[in-house]
Image (cartoon, rainbow, N blue to C red):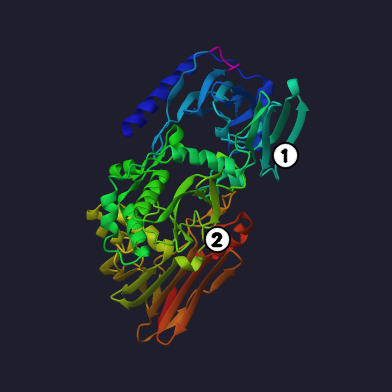
Amino acid sequence: MKYFFWSFFALSLIWSRDIYAQKHKTPPAEDVQLAKELSELFPDESVAYVENYDRISFDLDRGNDKVTVNQETTIYLLNLDSRADIHHASFYDGESEITKFEVESKNQKRTDYRIKDEAYTSDELFHNDVRVKHVYLDFPVNAFTYDIEIEKEIRDIKYFTNMYFIEEYPAAQRKIEIEIPSWLYLELRELNFENYDISKTVIEGKNGTKIHTYVMKMAKAHHEDENAPGPSHIYPHIMILPQSYTDNGEEKKIFKTTQDLYNWYKSLVDELENDNSDIIDKVQQLTRDAATDEDKIRSIYYWIQDNIRYIAFEDGIAGFKPDEASNVYNKRYGDCKGMANLTKQMLQIAGFDARLTWIGTKRIAYDYSTPNLSVDNHMICTVYLNDKPLFLDGTEHFNSMGEFADRIQGKQVLIENGDQFILENIPVSQADFNAEEIQYDLELIGGSLQGEVSKNFQGESRSSLLSYFHSLKNDRKDEFLEYYLSNGNGNINVTSIETSNLEDRDLDLNVNYEITVQNAVSEFDNEIYIDLDIDKELANYHMKERETDFIFNFKKDLHSTFKLKIPDGYKVSHIPESISLKNDDFQLSVKFEQEEGAIVYKKDFRIENAKVETKDFAEWNGFIEKLNNVYSEQIILTKG
């Protein structure tokens, strides 16, 4: 990895020198003025699109009985800073091809820009057939410009799912033109257009075509927020819904209804051979000693969670078609579709009614009322037990059976049912399902805080911790527990750790240990100053620099209690004020109380929907500011 970075860096320097070597003209006054105006509108940006223009048209490929898509992109890039260096990229795959990628600049004579064409790699993918054409662009002075022309062909319209207005850089004008021929029945669904300046015109073209033109003025770049909602929730875009086309008077369906979408998915599943001879013995072994049907399902499901490694895999049709169950079983890895198919086949061998199930995670805004390939991004298995659906997601390690990750809770699923399909929804758990209970019993001994700690984790607070714990090598697990329980703080010493069975995902996770905290107690004359809070949850969760909702991994329900014994001869002279905040989405409170001979400090943080919405940022940030003040205050005990 280091070699690649430095090689790439060195190559970039060579490219940069090549461009510097080219004589360039001073940018014209109108470009300088435009750069100034755009810089005032987008002060945090170094480059902007003066125009970003996509023209979409369609052709009929009778030889393959498909509708093809032609995408012509014209980009005019302008530097807003004293200099800038960027890469501009365009992606394609086995179902598409970039037929033109040209770069020009009116500021210099250069014509031989080094456009690279290479496989796209990602840490999240094991293998994929995505390729990228990209070019390094150096903007040596303010108002320097580049013109880029790209032409791309998509060989099957079903893979052309949407067009977004918001991109990597801001745009003075973002324009999308879609020309629909008279023989193609295609719906353009406009989503998230509210609060954006987007105009639309429709005119008649040649031979009965209709040309739909959308123009967005002064479009900001996409947000850089982490833990943000998926783009389909927040950015304006056009969903492309090709329903059918007419050829020689015959109507041919594409995705006119959800049934058409299911039929295509089913056609891919029907191509599977599913030779399960390698799997039969393992299924018999896993179910031999199971007392009930539920135990049999659980045994198979947990074996898949524990023994099949999830690795995303997108390679042509494999982005939609499940892998053979025997391949996943023998390789011991697969993507969500392969793992779902293995779950189905193993359960069917055991005599259960198991079915493949398509689903879009919460990152996707759509449901199956929209027949489009962008509606889902995940696959699980549904098994019917006592005529009720039980959903199994093998990619979620250490979820107990009947427990679902927040990312799919409430989402609609498409379940195979022969030539038909069934629509259901994943059950939704409340925040208290993920409860985390923490109890500290502490006292002052020799200038340090010492005592016992008890922690209980349920639901996703349990499964997420267990999943990470078991991802570690065996020789690092004890080290991780100590590090986790001490918050990585060298002043905290954790000993005598006792846990519940870390292999049993059906039980709550309990951890008990002894703790010693150094440098949390200071004594001056007759007073003792104590930093009592060790964990300081939510301390860094300010939402001041965000423009989008903040999405937590799962709903939170934390209950933490510190009980500090007051030393003999001392009384409490200062404790922080209690604070609270409550609305429909979260209830947050910090409370200090005095009991006989002790200070009791309680934190209750409940986040109902696993998110903080932008409309609540002012309230939220106000509480976090108060919370950090509490965390920075010390408890003061006075002798006498």
Q: Say which mark, if any, is on residue 197.
A: 1
Question: Which amino acid, mark 2?
Answer: Asn
Give yes or no for contact between labels 1 and 2 (Cβ–Cβ under 8 Å).
Answer: no
Q: Position of residue 420 (x, y in %)?
A: 54, 47
**Magenta stretch, overall SS:** loop
Residue 527 picture location, percent across and down: 40, 78
Q: Earlier in the sequence, mark 1 or mark 2?
A: 1
Magenta stretch contains residue 72:
no
Q: Which residues are magenta?
A: 105-110
The residue lying at 61 percent from left, 23 percent from top is 60
Disc 1 to disc 2, C-alpha distance: 31 Å
User: Of residues 550 and 472, which is closer to you in this image?
Assistant: 472
Q: Which residue is painted at 38% across and 82% down in the image?
A: 566
Q: Mark 1 packing: few (<14 Cα in 10 Å), some, or many (20+)? A: few
Quadrant including the C terminus: bottom left
Q: Secondary structure at mark 1?
A: loop
Q: Position of residue 316 (x, y in %)?
A: 45, 32
Q: Residue 622 is drawn in which quadrant?
A: bottom right
Task: Indicate the quadrant where residue 236 lies.
Answer: top right
Decide which of 434, 260 is in the foreground and name it: 260
Above or below, comparing residue 422 to residue 498 in the picture: above
Answer above or below: position of 334 versus 429.
above
Neighbor class of circle 2 (other Cα within 10 Å; few <14, some 14-19, many 20+) is: some
Residue 632 shows up from this direction: no
The residue that label 2 is drawn on is: 609
> In terms of depth relative to the viewer, which is nearer, 380 or 199?
380
